[in-house]
Image (spheres, coloured by chain):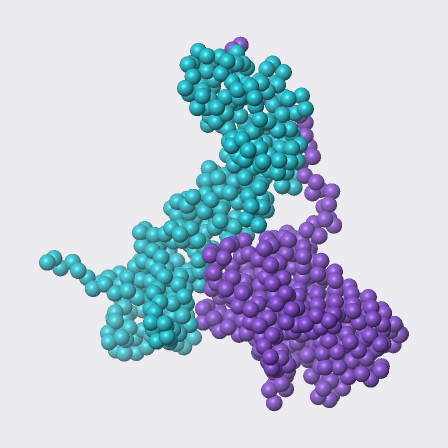
Amino acid sequence: MARNHEPKIFLFLSQILGKRIFDSKGRSLGKIVDLVANLTEPYPYVTDILLAPRSGRKQMFLPWQRITDVNNKTVAYPVTPDDFREPVLRENEALLKDALLDKQVVDTNGAKVLRVNDLHFLKTLNNLLLVHVDVGFRGLMRRVGLERPLDLFLRWFFDYTLSDQLISWKFIQTLASPDLLRLKVTQNRLARLHPADLADIIEELDIYKRTAVFQSLDVETAAETLEETSSEIQVSLIEDMEPAEASDIIEEMSLSEAADLLGDLPQDRAEDILKEMEDEFAEDVRELLVHHEGKAGGLMTTSFLRFAPSATVGEAMDCIRREAEDMDLIYYIYVVDEEEKLSGVIGLRELLTAPSKTSLGELMHTRVVSVNLDEKKGQIADHFAKYGLLAIPVVDEMNRIKGVIIFKNLLEVVAPQLGQ
Amino acid sequence: MAFNILKIKTTAFQNISRLRLWKSLGIFFVLIGPGIITSNVDNDAGGITTYSLAGADFGLELLWLLIPITLALIIIQEMCARMGVVSGKGLSDLIRERFGAKITFYLMIVLFFANLGNTVAEFAGVAASMEIFGVSKYIAVPAGAVFVWWLVVKGNYKSVEKAFLVACLFYLSYIISGFMGKPDWSEVRSAVLTPTIRFNYPFLVMAVGIIGTTIAPWMQFYLQSSVVDKGLKVDDYNYTRMDVILGSLTVNIVAFFIILLCAVTLFHSGIKIENAKDAALALEPLAGTYCSLLFAFGLLNASLFAASILPLSAAYTICEAFGWESSLNHKFAEAPQFYGLYFLMIFLGAGIILLPDMPLISIMFYSQVINGVLLPFILIFMLLLINDRRVMGHYTNSLFMNVVAWLTVASLIFLSGAMVFASLI
């Protein structure tokens, strides 16, 4: 066998902190009060210990490499004054206890905000690697000093062994303040999360971390995440941003979501953001803002496709290909006359299967389910349930098409009432 | 042309939000809640009992004490609200991050029992007040427990807050019943303006009791958490401070009227009472049936209100400290510890009342003692945290505020220490 199997020992931070360090002559140098680690990928390694000498002298860093374990007494090999360095963190370094222990972190695998009870290290011949974060009850009891009593109690009374709840460092996104500043620079693990999970996490954080995390996201992820958060938190996040940055994100949102959000903002704030937007998008949003939120007009989007009856299937398909990226709805196209009056609807499936020379007027269904601008959300929900549609057009009293309500947008309004 | 994409043209539109109309006064009403609710919960069954006894036993002599209590309450609650707004974190969160797992663990255990004791007292209040209305406690207490569970679990933060704000309004019943006692206002004025201190044991115990019931450990956690939960920001802080001051004033105004009413009726007629129920019953011949019923209704409202908040606050605080999911927005399976603790508090709180031969008086008595033991630790942690620049930035206490705060805290610690000492010998 090759000689490459190093002794592998796992250690907890709580077992390391407070240990006394002796020099090779057996004199006490002080206690370990924190560990300095270089936050490299995939696992941070410990570079130094923060040593607190007994007699109120200044705390110093001592390289981890100098330290060894002799008969459970932690000994630093021949120490010269040069071994110590001033307790100033270098690039990419952090104090582990200070930054992580008892603090909140995000488990990007389970999509949860958790509190760190302990840190779990792998000790190899030369290095101490931070491999896991302990978030379990056993870890908490270890910190309290009741790990053994808890184990004995559970074994005696329930024949149960509580295991440690360890989460691999690979999945951990820290939230401690010095690290937050670096979120943008270093690899952001939060980006792996689904926007809906990200939204849940953001809602759970305090307002400052919330803002920091949100602002660390790229524009597209931020927009998707924003769509998934509750309206109060949307407002609070947007209010913390410059209008220009906010408008970049809001432009990435769907039209109706963007309008809802701007409608919730204080008027002057919303105006500032609208001014920063592309004119076309801003105009569409203003259009939607006129309507009451609980009614058809407030739920609809104006980002959909409509055609004259004389247009052919081929022309419609070309148009869909060109515009699909920017449209909120492409599954139905609506056929309108020259006065914008709604005369028919065609599903995408029918469009795909029809010969490309067919005119839309021939293909369309003339019996269109539509609602008025001031229809209430309850009735709209009934329509969706009854006809099984993905979207319902909204018309004014002259039967002119004003917008389309997409099922997903209605669901967000109706869903909170479903669970009750 | 064969086809064209029609784009709806914009009609000019300006009226984006109606918020501006409300701006100054409106914002205040949107942002208030935490301070007023916390303070009013403070006038719970235990508080009303203490005030009734103070009035019945010592007449108007203890009224002046409410002025320093109001000031102390404002000073302490202001710090909590400020910490919540500036750090965005709850008090137990800050204590955990700053003082570590061990201290937090034991602190939370003590807090659990202190709150449990208080919850028992609230359900005792429900039982007592409903007995005045002729309802057996075996019906009233389970119904109260179900109501509390339903209100909080089925509601969301906003609806619960609204229900609580309405409950605050019901405290007016004490002010009305206070006027029904027809006090002699000139006598009241001189009693407030000339502090009386008697150096005898019952008087001092009562004085300490009033302070102890008004400034309790759970309040600091609850206030700070609700400030955080409401998402208040530093810009809103002036409104939050108003909220806290208003809350501290109303709590003491209610206390004032309870002491006043019991002083001018029960004390003048020389009637001795044991608890708030006695007070309500004794009021009937002296101040009329309506006054007595109003008093009982106030007690019911206060007890139910506090019974909703105390278990919630305990569950919230403990989960926050240990990093467990803690929000009413989660389902049971997502936050088992939170709902478990909440259920346990209500179950034990209501259950203990229904057990025959429970030594209720001593349960409440010892819960006061636990509160008294806990309070100094909480207050000292608070002062350390609020002066920590890493937590508070440049919103730490000013030198003046520190002097005032430390003096207040020192006297509170002395008094609660004295109470614990006196109660144990």
Question: Residue A273 appears in which quarter of the rendering?
Answer: top right
Who's the residue at 66% across and 76% down the image? B212
Residue A303 relative to residue A97: left or right: right
**Farthest-out residue, left:** A1
> x, y (%) of residue A108?
40, 50
Q: Colour of chain B?
A: purple
Up/down of A403 relative to B147, above or below: above
Q: Is residue B83 visible?
A: no
Q: As drawn, which residue projects farthest toward the top?
A: B1
Image position of A215 with respect to B276: above or below: above
Q: Nearer the viewer, residue A88 or B237?
A: B237
Q: Is residue A197 above or below residue B140?
A: above
Query: Is residue B21 in view from this perspective?
Result: yes
On screen, residue A47 versus residue A177, left or right, reads left
Q: Write the residue at 69% across / 83% down.
A: B205
Viewer-nearest residue: B343 or B85: B343
Q: Quadrant of the N terminus of chain A?
A: bottom left
Which chain comes out cyan in the rendered image?
A: A
